[in-house]
Amino acid sequence: MTSRPWRDAKPRRVVAPTMSMRLGPQAGEVIDRAASITFEWNGRTYPAHRGDTIASALAACGVDVFSRSFKYHRPRGLLTASHLDPGCMVQVGDEPNVRGAHRLVEADMQVRSQDTWPSLSFDVKAANELVRRALPAGFYYKTFMSPGWLWPTYERVLERFAHGGVVGTQAPDGRPGRYDKRHAHPDVLVAGGGPAGMAAAVAAARAGSSVMLVEEEQQLGGHLRWGDDADLSALREMRALVETTPGIEVLTDSVVLGRYDSNWVSVLQRGLPEIDERLVKARVKTLVVAAGLIERPYVFAGNDVPGVMLSTAVRRLVNLYAVKPGERAVVLAANAAGDAAAADLERVGVDVVRVEDARTGGDVVAVRGRGRVRSVQTADGQSIDCDLVVTATGWTAAVSLLTMAGDVPRYEPSAARFMPDLARLSVDVMATGGIVGDGTLEELVAHADATGREAARRAAAVAATRRSASPTATVEDAGSGDAMPAIVPPTLPVNPHPELFRGRTHGIVDFSEDVSSKDLFSAVAEGYRSAELAKRYTTATMGPAQGKLETVNAVAVVAEATGQTIAETGTTTWRPPYAPVTLGALAGREREPIRRSPMQAWHESHGSTTLVAGAWVRPDHYGDPAAEATAVREGVGIIDVTPIGKLDLRGPDVARLLNLVYVNKWSKLEVGRVRYGVMCGEDGVVIDDGVTGRLGDEHYLMSTTSSGAAAIWAWLESWLQTDHPQWQVHVTPVTTSYASINVAGPDSRELLGRVVDDLDIGPEAFPYMHVRTGRVAGVEGCVLWRIGFTGELSFELHVPAGYGLHVWEALLEAGRDLGVRPFGIEAQRILRLEKGHFIIGQDTDGLTRAYSAGLDGLVKLDKDDVAGMPELRWQHDQRDGPRLVGLRTADGSLVPVEGSQLVDRDGRICGRVTSSRLSPSLGRSVCLGQLDAEHAQPGTQVTVRLIDGTTAAAVVTEHLAQVDPEGSRLRG
Amino acid sequence: MILLPCPWCGPRDSEEFGYVGEIGARPDPRTATQQQWRDYLYLRRNVAGWASERWYHRMGCRRYLVIERDSTTNEIRQSRPETPRSKP
């Protein structure tokens, strides 16, 4: 081990960490030295100042190693000291994958390193460095394949090596994450709060636009923040301008996630007091991308050793956080930023031993060291002892948002970077700042100012177009005829820059995914010769930075390996999200609409068990569904059926519509009559059923299934608008305008008579399948029809919804001596099953055409047109497909699970049980099923295969109804 | 995310609409062969480029409308109210 006097001179503190690397006050520092706080890192207490990030506080205390790399578990330190820093993902409390170089320290924060076992300083898994040959890129396609019986073992072993932190199921204080959503409509959204972004925002706001300025860091300013005095002074001015110009909403610690069609832009906002994260969905008129330049790492041996960092990392640490990045430095500078970093280091007392100027042939060949840089070999062959290697080898334009808007970046060899192809951008997206070109601060600001003004002009034009596109637009909305001329921003110079991607040795290209340039060469040698293929095979650029640090180097290495130019190799495609986003933010607040009938509160306070059916909550039963069903068969019961779809149909052509959508005939339905109908789709499959009654010459009320209420309305409208606009029919949904109550049982007429006073409801005056309107319990305008889903004498009342509870309670009161009780959905299911009434979606499925649902008598094929007519005709002619049958198990106490298969003598599946319940009336099970036609004759023996694999005998019943098959109770 | 130009409501976000499908003629149900009818039910041209398609403004005016859209760029050229499907 070479001696490192400058290092050994530092006193080793074993007890309490102190800020040994903290510098004196810096002109642009963001820490508040007056506010001292402490936090925990891997169980030890560390000091910090308010304004420190986790990484800067730890670096101030001399911490070198923050994590271990993904595959090889090599120690990693700070590389960029920004939110993209790949070595700095830490666990904060129960939150994994926190960006330690971005997250601000809070008092008593508990921070741990991720993915290190047993500890950060000694990681057993580093032993897999030794088996590096077994774990090249794509190893999972080659190794750990056989034998197959070892897969569970491989899984358990590889699990321990999987990357990432720990997700707690609950926050330490027990509260779930708080997420929120917001819709915004800014005229101009500026992505990026550096000098160009600020200038564009101010210019757009001054031109009259509402502006949203989004900045990923906690303050505006971009690279000005760690610049020289002139930069800091410009920063103060620009910040003041942003603050005082009206119309600019600033979102810091927020990131634009993606740009979608028609400039729909999503923004993830953090740093809000009461909310963890808020997803802002913005419809933006003009998007201005000022995302700037990201510094690129240099690829060489040892480039991931702690102590190797980028020039921006050094400048941030020194100028923003007053942290000394090391004691003895070698700087590789290919541009002005490298020079400035060297100057900053010298200013704060770091011994800058050598500046390798890449512009004149300087280079860094390899770094030696493991937990920290020990020495570096330079181009002239010398080995220099140091603990800090700084590289400034080039910039990558952050063009992701632009590519989401259709840009295909071009490689500019003289500038050694990809530039956006501004001509391909759609008119609602613009770019400014470092992304577009270089130049002095004044030149960049001038470009941004013009861009902002043009963005505002375009936004105003879009606003005018949208206003005039509205059908209620007036002449004024069309806008003044004299449109402002377009403002063309001045051209920015593009500075030449040497092409430096990979040095003379192999090094890490993707720090997060642990992909080296050697891996990329291997991938190319194996045939993955394009950037897209090599990316997918090696996973390079697929880490949390999503290529921002890695793509250009990866492309350059692939180009090298294939012998092509970088321009020929091209880049991979950037897709949203721009930055990783939590699922919580995407989910937002829990805000599901719930529908309740006017009587639902009554049900719940009377012991109902809730059933969730779509958006509705309904009473499943009140404690004893069998008893409820028995009450209906023997006395009277009432059920809340409000969710039933109801459609009011008016006009002279309603009967035509009914004939078109129902399989049966409707032209001769008289006023006061009700008819049952079934609807099929154009493929002949049963889609809905219900009863429709004629209330007047041109007035009908249609009922549908509850789940079909919205779909059937759209279905009717589709026929009326698409095929028969000449028919005069008005459709009005009244599902929620009426509360619906079914009064069922032998005593139902008696009960109803006690609450209806203006109507004769006797058997001759109000026969089966008729409809009346009248006054129920004093409520006018009720619709009553006499139908019978449950198979008993019953009446369905549709009461204006506001009076639903009143009528419900009136019925219960009036029928006390009759023993009236409410019954729920479960009892209704039992009752209808006893009567063999099918439920669409339960006894039918997506392939059940009309004849397979027992509707032979209902389908009338001699009509002009009906939805699905050809399919119905073909099914009728071919007599194929399964049939709906009733089933009776030999053992009455056996209630087969719904879905149990029916098998024939040879064990082949020939059907299934679709509905199955224990019948209280019969004291035995009753079933409906779908059964292939050849077995569907009444009396046929079939075998039920139960879910435990055993079988049971059953027979096909004579009728679908097993209780009162003649239906005498209904018509009484 | 696409802005759809509803002829009655103006430009609205596509989430307010239901996509119904390609415009296609409905064969005469009385004379269609099985092949013709099932082509109508299940086959689509699925053009990469400009096509007319039907949308339903379910969270708006609840009218059916026809839009011309380029499926490769989502550019929308024109929209008009629903018109009767031509019958052969």
Image (cartoon, coloured by chain):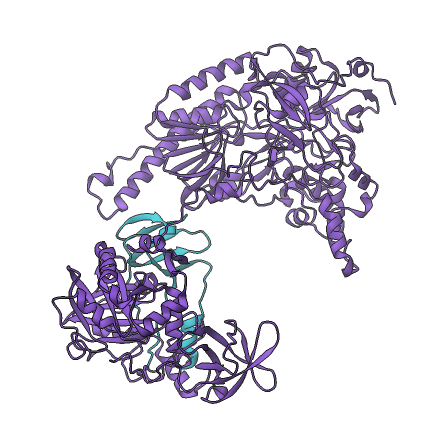
Is A628 on the left or on the right of A760, as rendered?
right
Rendered location of residue A242, percent (x, y): 41, 21
Q: Colour of chain B?
A: cyan
Between residue A891 and residue A731, name the one nearer to us.
A891
Which quadrant of the figure contains the C terminus of chain A?
bottom left
Name the quadrant containing residue A78.
top right
Question: Which residue is at a point 37% across and 50% down the rendered structure image?
Answer: A593
Spot the residue most to the front: A817
Which quadrant of the figure contains the N terminus of chain A?
top right
Rendered location of residue A502, percent (x, y): 72, 35
Image height of A842 relative to A499, above or below? below
Image height of A37 relative to B4, above or below? above
Question: Which residue is at a point 41% across and 61% down the rendered structure image?
Answer: A623
Q: Can residue A719 be seen in this snapshot?
A: no
Name the quadrant containing residue B20.
bottom left
Is A452 on the left or on the right of A301, as rendered?
left
Q: Colour of chain A?
A: purple
Question: Which residue is at a point 50% across and 42% down the rendered structure image?
Answer: A584
Between residue A233 and residue A349, name the one nearer to us.
A349
